């Protein structure tokens, strides 16, 4: 019998740096799960991850079809990488992924962000990436709490039972 005392996770700080459909949703699913478990949740979107919180792109994210070794066709067969570069393939695969997610009652990105913040989670944007892509706070989802430097974000991630997760 293990006599170690368990110290449950109290806070998660997630960093989303990729803007593909599967990367943004991985972040949102994990963040929403943490909120639902009562874990303090902070999500920082940087570089291409900003697409996940930018109003004009967040509900039209694409699945990477070229250079994605984990890509599978229906039935589990490997997806031939050369097909991913053909016109319309990425759009069709992305549409299929969104349809499958909808069938599983997964909300679109904007609704997912609302669920996370309604549960007490906090959404942040990276100042450096915002400056680099010439974005303003008004370009982002209303669920974004603030634009922060990475140093500011790390200050929010203090505490003994805190995990920083890079998705």
Image: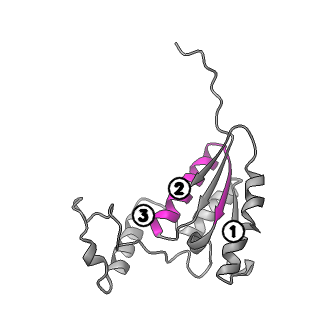
Choose the circle earlier in sequence order: 3 or 1: 3
Check whether the beta carbons of the residues at disc 2 and disc 1 lie within 8 A of each other: no
Mark-to-mark CA distance, 3 and 1: 25 Å
State yes or no: discs 3 and 1 in contact (Cβ < 8 Å): no
Q: Secondary structure at mark 3?
A: helix
Q: Quadrant of residue 95?
A: bottom left
Q: Where residue 68 is drawn, which disc sits there?
A: none
Write the start and end of the magenta stretch as one range. Answer: 21-45
The image quadrant that residue 100 belongs to is bottom left
Our reading of the magenta stretch's main secondary structure is helix
Secondary-structure class at tag 1 = strand
What residue occupies the far bottom of the structure in this picture?
87
Q: Of circles 2 and 1, which is in front?
A: 1
Q: Alpha carbon of mark 2 to alpha carbon of mark 3: how far?
A: 12 Å
The answer to whether residue 110 of the structure is visible from this angle is yes
Measured as percent of width and height from the top left, residue 160 is found at 72, 37
Residue highlighted by disc 1: 125
**Residue 141 appears in the rendering:** no
Mark number, residue 101: 3
Count of number-bearing discs: 3
**Residue drawn at (57%, 49%), measured in percent from left and top?**
33
Q: Please, is residue 88 above or below residue 37 in the view? A: below
Residue labelled with disc 2: 29
Q: Residue at the location (75% across, 41% down)?
A: 159
Q: Sequence-wise, which precedes: disc 2 or disc 3? A: 2
Q: 38 above or below 43?
A: above
Q: Residue furthest top?
A: 1
């Amino acid at each position: 019998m293990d006599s170690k005392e368990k110290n449950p996770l109290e806070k998660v700080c997630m960093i989303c740096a990729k803007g593909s459909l599967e990367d943004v949703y991985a972040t949102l699913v994990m963040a929403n799960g943490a909120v639902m478990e009562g874990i303090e949740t902070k999500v920082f979107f940087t570089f291409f991850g900003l697409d996940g919180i930018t109003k004009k792109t967040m509900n039209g994210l694409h699945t990477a079809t070229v250079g994605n070794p984990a890509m599978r066709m229906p039935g589990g067969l490997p997806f031939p990488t050369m097909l991913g570069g053909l016109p319309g393939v990425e759009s069709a695969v992305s549409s299929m992924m969104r349809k499958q997610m909808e069938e599983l009652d997964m909300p679109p990105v904007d609704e997912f962000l609302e669920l996370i913040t309604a549960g007490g989670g906090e959404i942040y944007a990276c100042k450096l990436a915002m400056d680099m892509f010439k974005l303003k706070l008004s370009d982002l989802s209303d669920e974004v709490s603030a634009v922060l430097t990475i140093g500011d974000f790390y200050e929010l991630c203090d505490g003994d039972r805190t995990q920083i997760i890079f998705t």
